[in-house]
Image (cartoon, grey):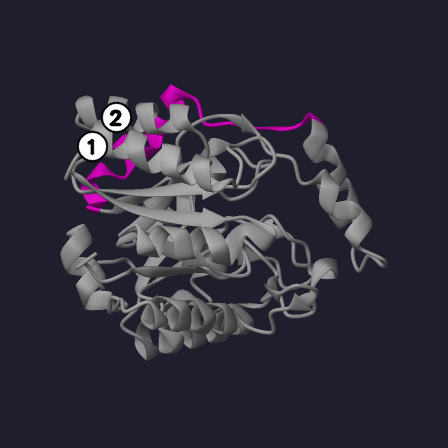
Amino acid sequence: MANKVIITCAVTGAIHTPSMSPYLPISPDEIAEAAIGAAKAGAAVVHLHARETKDGRPTQDPKMFMQFLPKIKAASDVVINLTTGGAPTMSIEDRLQPALQLKPEVASLNMGSMNFGLYEMIPRVTEWKYDWEKPYLAGSDDRIFKNTFKDIAHILQSCSENNTRFEIECYDIGHLYTAAHFLDRGLVKAPLFIQSVFGIRGGIGPHPEDVLHMRRTADRLFGDQYQWSVLGGGRNQMYIATQSAVMGGNVRVGLEDSLWIGKGQLAKTNADQVAKIRRIIEEVGLEIATPDDARKVLKLKGKNNVNF
């Protein structure tokens, strides 16, 4: 409980589409503004995807990332975390490129192949802005997010000389064991940054007992060799984050994970969600971590040792 809480903000992601919220950052300027705003509100880390400006489609083109990364770096001391997840429709090589070429302090990495169901979001949309959105969501009932052991090893080995650390995303208990396997192989090094994901269709559920089970298992596997964080999908976001904080863990919020700030109320900015969880954390007597606190705890290489 003495540790400061690291707030990660996931700014835009590949789960939601533009028709779901008018507040979802799409253009490079919008993504930069959202990330800088989240940092000012208290996020120590921002987790970033890129989108095509013309229609909001997810992209892993490093050139798109370079339209906003230098702006964020110049305006803020925040830790920048780039996705290797991209979208389930992309190849491993495409998903790898931003982390490989741009050499961030942190990159995300999913610990397994899995069903990733987004199709239940379709009835919530009354009008579609772009032709790609509905088929993208509908096709998720027959689509697998692919990250085999070989894929994970390839990503880790490809980025090994970059000194990039990984936000190790665990959507189920077995993913923790996979992370332990790669620790044993020496492809990841302590301290691990374990991000436990709850409430995504295809992964572990959002019940408080699920959160406890994840934490207990991670403690048994990693002991003092890791930092624990959580994200809850959709309406699960804030109460799972609160549970983690009071258990001594870290938290992730942001419009990638949930479009909402309260029941029936869309969040207008990522900063709104960061500010809300910050209030909760501080109301229960805890402190939030600064970017430099996060760098120290996670043993990061520093903002000037990146390729952007």
The part of the chain drawn in magenta is 142-163
Tag 2's secondary structure?
helix
The residue positioned 46% from the left and 51% from the top of the image is: 240
Tag 1's secondary structure?
helix
Q: Is residue 71 above or below residue 110?
A: below
Q: Label 1: how many residues lie within 10 Å, few (<14), some (14-19) or many (20+)? A: some
Mark 2 vs mark 1, foreground winner is: 1
Indicate the amino acid at tag 2: Ala
Q: Is residue 282 magenta?
A: no
Position of 56 with respect to 301 (left or right) is right
Position of 170 with respect to 130 (left or right) is left
Indicate the amino acid at tag 1: Phe
Q: Quadrant of residue 186?
A: top left
Task: Kindly indicate whether the residue at mark 1 contacts the one at mark 2 (C-beta within 8 angstroms).
Answer: yes
Q: Is residue 162 magenta?
A: yes
Depth check: give the residue in front, 306 or 295: 295
- Name the residue tied to disc 2: 180
- In the rendered image, residue 270, in percent from the top left (x then y), is placed at 51, 69
The residue positioned 55% from the left and 73% from the top of the image is: 269
Q: Is residue 180 above or below residue 84?
A: above
Quadrant where the N terminus sits is bottom left
Q: Which mark is residue 222?
A: 1
Position of 62 with respect to 246 (left or right) is right
- In the rendered image, residue 235, in percent from the top left (x then y), is placed at 60, 54
